[in-house]
Amino acid sequence: MKKLTGIVICFIIAVVAWLLGMKFPVVGGPVFGILIGMVTAKLVDVSSFREGIVLTAKKLLQFSIILLGFEMNLMSVLRVGSKSLLVMIFTLGTAFGVAYIASKTLKIDKNSAILVGAGTSICGGSAIAAAAPIIRAKDEEVVKSISVIFLFNIAAVFIFPALGKIMHLSDVGFGMWAGTAVNDTSSVVATGSAWSQMVGNDVALKFATIVKLTRTLMIIPVSFILAAITGREMKAKAESQSGECEVSKVKISKIFPWFVIGFLLAACICTFFMPGAKAYGYLGRSGKFIIVMAMSAIGLNTDVIELVKKGKKPIVLGLCCWIAVASVSILVQYFMKML
């Protein structure tokens, strides 16, 4: 009963956060969920319901990624992929490379660097939600990463359109830039909308949105790579601590991101079985709501005071990744004569 109560608490917080996210889409429901969860944990003792809260933060989070696949039409991805794939590859490598170097320089934990790199290069909170269970990230690391991504989402909406005008970008060029360099889907839409209002057409907005959805597919290879690295590290740790005989206890099946297979299957169903069906949209939105539930649970498990104390370095890390990705996206487009 207490487990169910913990899940219900997360659900109630998520409903409020979801409604606030609809009212203020640039901030988004996941950020509101974290904030309300942290405030609730300070005002109310939820320790008795910890089991249900943890279940929401871990298991439901993985299930939400599967549901997101129902928003992914692979045919649309293929149409845009030939134009955007090279830009995505460069921005993806840049984000993780800069995150690694900056984390070593700033002495930030590896998990936070991976999560910020994934959030910056792929799709903000959804990528963090996918990577977190694979690398065994702590709730505090997830919250810090989501907060960093949120900060630069807000900045992008105001800065990108102005910079695009200064650089005299075409509508397609700006759409590609926003789609590959702005972190979260809602922020990509907001940034594209701001540009469209300035130029009087929706070309950039539509192109940026499709590029962003294409970029979301990068969750699949990145998750497999992270799973392989995590498995190797766990085996090496087991070997060093207990000898060769203990290495077999590290089961790859527990590390392998099975939920990403579910994401891909959902995308295939959306593409080949009754494409365009309204039910897929509902399933995709359900996935986003469950992410808000999971972030609410993570907020309930987070000490806000400790978070503030440790929050400066991750912001610098996020800034480095953000500037690097935005710059590389423009440079690749310039050399490919896409601007």
Image (cartoon, rainbow, N blue to C red):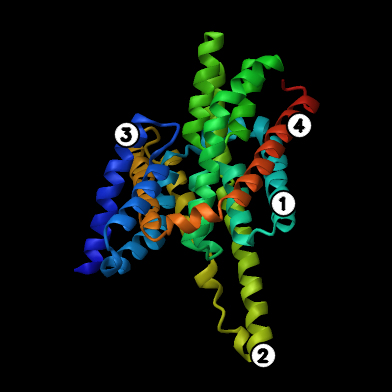
Q: Residue at x 56, y 49 (%)?
A: 219
Amino acid found under the numbered disc labelled 4: Val
157 relative position to 103: left or right: left
In this rendering, the answer to whether 311 lies above or below 149 is: below
Helix, strand or loop under label 2: loop
Q: Nearer the viewer, mark 1 or mark 2?
A: 1
User: For the residue carrying disc 3, how many other residues have a C-alpha within 10 Å: few (<14), some (14-19), or many (20+)?
Assistant: few
Helix, strand or loop under label 3: helix
198 relative position to 181: left or right: left
Q: Where does residue 325 sit, x and y in percent of width and height?
A: 68, 38
In this view, the residue in front, 62 or 292, is 292
User: For the residue carrying disc 2, how many other residues have a C-alpha within 10 Å: few (<14), some (14-19), or many (20+)?
Assistant: few
Q: Residue at x 77, y 22 (%)?
A: 337
Residue assigned mark 4: 332
Q: Nearer the viewer, mark 2 or mark 3?
A: 2
Name which of mark 2 and mark 4 comes first in the sequence. Answer: 2
Q: Quadrant of residue 29?
A: top left
In this view, the residue in front, 158 or 214, is 158
Residue assigned mark 3: 278
Label for residue 102?
Answer: 1
Q: CA distance from mark 1 to mark 2?
A: 34 Å
Q: Are marks 1 and 3 in contact (CB under 8 Å)?
A: no
Amino acid found under the numbered disc labelled 1: Ala
Name which of mark 1 and mark 4 comes first in the sequence. Answer: 1
Q: CA distance from mark 1 to mark 4?
A: 22 Å
Residue 257 in view (yes/no): no
Name which of mark 2 and mark 3 comes first in the sequence. Answer: 2
Name which of mark 1 and mark 3 comes first in the sequence. Answer: 1
Helix, strand or loop under label 1: helix
Q: Where does residue 3 sit, x and y in percent of width and height?
A: 25, 67
